[in-house]
């Protein structure tokens, strides 16, 4: 495997662990991935709920929680640790400022276009910025906007395809359209980003995610021009994943027909594992009485069938009767719980073996 270079950061394994909230990827998982040469990512989503013992004020608890998670990660690894911050979060600015102040290596930001992300960098800040996009048009717009307004060039660009887990940046009818497949998107986005990079005499790495599951998948997508990959689902069924064992078990128990597209209260389609909770939602039996968090800008409690923060927090804690697990399209393929070390070694072996077959026998 070729190393992934993001500015002066060097990941010896070109794998970025996707940021998974609420609570699925915290310091435990992020530091384990970083220790194996990948890029570990702490999700900032829902930290105010996880750290509510510190403060009942959601935003204050979120800031404290991110500081704590970065501190714990730094104690556990000298590798690369980033933070995922969703544009749709009401405390987006707080989380970005905190990540920069606490010297996170990189911020990944999607669920909306992070057009003003460079504005939060302070003088001398070393934190890299990597927007998450779902089209070549979005990549071009963002690159141009960042450069024209801030004279800033993205340190990396992540493209998330429609097989990703959690909230998806696509219309529901696009999810099964081959024109929006990751394999179709990567060459388009790589071409756009390379052209922008050539104009400014630099190389912007493109990281591809959404449905990548094996070392062979990594090889194939990198052959299309990606410099690295983002993987979330594979890391859920690891010993170091921060979720409750019951959450991980939902992946082990899932069958292909259990993976479904849901309508999230935040106004985006999402991919999740079927649960009795989701059945009750469809029957109209779940209705929030008030909004205890004000966590997502686009969530309107008067029209929401349930509180997504509580549902995801309950799932993180293993209370699946009152929540559900977000997942990628390949979650049903999970067979066992293993260490991050063993998973990364297996992915490297699969990549190398497939690469060797390609060289010896050519493409099949």
Image (spheres, rainbow, N blue to C red):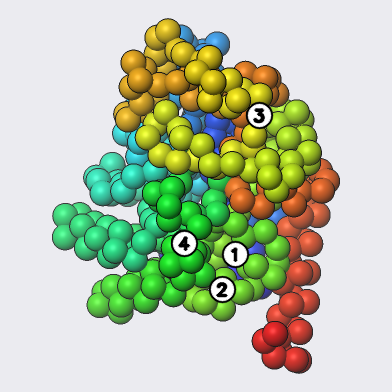
For label 4, the crowd category at 10 Å Cα-Cα, with few meaning under 14, some 14 to 19 and many 20 or more, is few
Kindly indicate whether the residue at mark 2 contacts the one at mark 1 (C-beta within 8 angstroms).
Answer: yes
Which residue occupies the foreground of this view, 330 or 128? Answer: 330
Earlier in the chain: of badge 1 and badge 4, it is 1
Q: CA distance from mark 3 to mark 4?
A: 26 Å
Q: CA distance from mark 1 to mark 3?
A: 34 Å
Identify the residue shown where x is 29% and y is 63%: 137
Residue farthest left in this picture: 148
Earlier in the chain: of badge 4 and badge 2, it is 4
Q: Looking at the image, is mark 3 or mark 2 nearer the viewer?
A: 3
Q: Which residue is mark 4?
A: 177
Q: Which residue is mark 2?
A: 222
Report whether 213 appears left or right of 8. Answer: right
For label 3, the crowd category at 10 Å Cα-Cα, with few meaning under 14, some 14 to 19 and many 20 or more, is some
Q: CA distance from mark 4 to mark 2?
A: 22 Å
Q: CA distance from mark 3 to mark 2?
A: 35 Å
Q: Which residue is mark 3?
A: 275
Q: Looking at the image, is mark 4 or mark 2 nearer the viewer?
A: 4
Secondary structure of residue under mark 3: loop
- The quadrant of the picture occupied by the C terminus is bottom right
Which residue occupies the foreground of this view, 34 or 167? Answer: 167
- Residue 359's spot in the image, x, y percent? 71, 89
Identify the residue shown where x is 76% and y is 84%: 357
Earlier in the chain: of badge 1 and badge 3, it is 1
Q: Which residue is mark 1?
A: 14
Secondary structure of residue under mark 1: loop
């Amino acid at each position: 495997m070729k190393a992934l270079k993001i500015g002066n950061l060097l990941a010896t394994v070109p794998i970025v662990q996707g940021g998974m909230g609420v609570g699925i990827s915290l310091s435990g998982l992020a530091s384990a991935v970083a220790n194996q040469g990948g890029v570990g990512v702490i999700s900032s989503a829902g930290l105010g709920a996880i750290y509510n013992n510190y403060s009942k004020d959601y935003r204050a608890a979120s800031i404290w929680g991110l500081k704590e998670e970065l501190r714990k990660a730094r104690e556990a690894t000298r590798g690369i640790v980033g933070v995922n911050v969703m544009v749709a979060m009401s405390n987006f600015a707080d989380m970005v400022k905190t990540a920069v102040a606490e010297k996170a290596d990189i911020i990944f930001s999607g669920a909306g276009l992070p057009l003003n992300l460079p504005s939060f960098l302070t003088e001398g800040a070393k934190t890299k910025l990597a927007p998450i996009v779902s089209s070549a048009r979005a990549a071009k717009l963002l690159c141009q906007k960042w450069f024209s307004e801030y004279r800033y060039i993205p340190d990396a660009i992540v493209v998330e395809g429609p097989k990703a887990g959690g909230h998806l940046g696509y219309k529901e009818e696009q999810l099964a359209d081959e024109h929006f497949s990751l394999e179709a998107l990567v060459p388009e986005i790589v071409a756009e980003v390379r052209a922008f990079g050539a104009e400014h005499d630099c190389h912007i790495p493109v990281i591809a995610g959404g449905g990548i599951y094996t070392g062979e998948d990594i090889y194939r997508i990198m052959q299309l021009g990606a410099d690295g990959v983002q993987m979330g689902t594979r890391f859920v069924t690891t010993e170091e994943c921060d979720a409750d064992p019951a959450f991980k078990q939902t992946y082990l128990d899932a069958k292909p027909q259990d993976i479904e597209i849901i309508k999230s209260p935040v106004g985006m389609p999402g991919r999740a594992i079927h649960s009795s909770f989701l059945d009750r939602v469809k029957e109209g039996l779940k209705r929030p009485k008030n909004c205890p968090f004000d966590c997502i800008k686009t969530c309107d409690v008067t029209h929401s069938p349930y509180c997504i923060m509580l549902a995801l927090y309950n799932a993180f804690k293993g209370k699946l009767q009152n929540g559900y697990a977000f997942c990628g399209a390949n979650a049903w393929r999970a067979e066992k719980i293993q260490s991050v070390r063993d998973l990364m070694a297996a992915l490297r072996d699969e990549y190398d073996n497939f690469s060797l077959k390609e060289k010896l026998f050519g493409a099949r």
